[in-house]
Image (cartoon, rainbow, N blue to C red):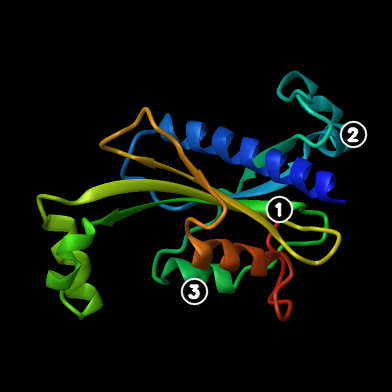
């Protein structure tokens, strides 16, 4: 069972790296982008016409399908994700988003008010921009498999990897797969 979970984790990580490269081709300052994840072999079986666009590189390979209608404007990202529920046919999901932050030593100078804090960070000369791609997969045991990749705009050649990088975001994505209640399907 451990090797199956490791294999699925590796498949998720490979899909997230592919999504980060895809999103990165459009540059920085992009809105959040949402993707459904489907096993490539199952996708090709259901849609043979995609054979010239997809290849099965591994038995557990995943393909990403961007959800063009995802638009969290007017709501914060976590609220938008809390309203989302995937149908059982979706194996997993991923979200690409950008965030700005300041070095830890500057955190005490950030205003408490969220609006002022966002403005302060956005205009600070030591601001750092980060693209995060977080993902979650359904697991047969009911526990999500989660992973993240991230890239700093100031250091674009390095890709950071970790399952616990943004736990609130991966948990929010996992809840879209199982959720405490069904809040409507997103297809």
Q: Residue furthest top?
A: 52
SS at mark 1?
strand
Q: Which residue is mark 3?
A: 79
Give the label, 3 or 1, closer to the camera: 1
Q: Residue furthest front?
A: 2
Separation of marks 3 and 2 at Cα, in angstroms: 35 Å
SS at mark 2?
helix
48 or 9, nearer to the observer: 9
Proximity of marks 3 and 2: CB atoms separated by less than 8 Å: no
Q: Earlier in the sequence, mark 3 or mark 1?
A: 3
SS at mark 3?
helix
Q: Which mark is residue 45?
A: 2
**Left or right side of 134 for 174:** right
Residue 87 image offset from top left, x and y in percent: 78, 62
Q: Which residue is mark 1?
A: 92
Q: Earlier in the sequence, mark 3 or mark 2?
A: 2
């Amino acid at each position: 069972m451990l090797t199956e979970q490791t294999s699925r984790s590796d498949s998720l990580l490979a899909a997230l790296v592919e999504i980060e490269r895809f999103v990165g081709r459009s540059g920085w300052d992009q809105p959040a982008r949402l993707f459904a994840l489907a096993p490539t072999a199952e996708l090709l079986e259901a849609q043979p016409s995609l054979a010239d666009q997809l290849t099965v590189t591994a038995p557990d390979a995943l393909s990403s399908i961007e959800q063009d209608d995802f638009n969290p404007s007017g709501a914060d990202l976590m609220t938008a994700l809390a309203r989302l529920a995937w149908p059982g046919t979706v194996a997993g999901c991923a979200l690409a988003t950008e965030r700005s932050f300041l070095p830890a030593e500057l955190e005490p100078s950030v205003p408490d008010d969220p609006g002022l804090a966002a403005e302060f960070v956005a205009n600070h000369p030591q601001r750092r921009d980060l693209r995060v791609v977080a993902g979650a997969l359904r697991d047969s045991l009911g526990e999500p498999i989660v992973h993240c990749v991230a890239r700093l705009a100031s250091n674009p050649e390095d890709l950071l990897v970790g399952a616990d990088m943004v736990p609130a975001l991966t948990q929010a994505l996992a809840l879209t797969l199982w959720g405490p209640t069904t809040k409507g399907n997103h297809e």
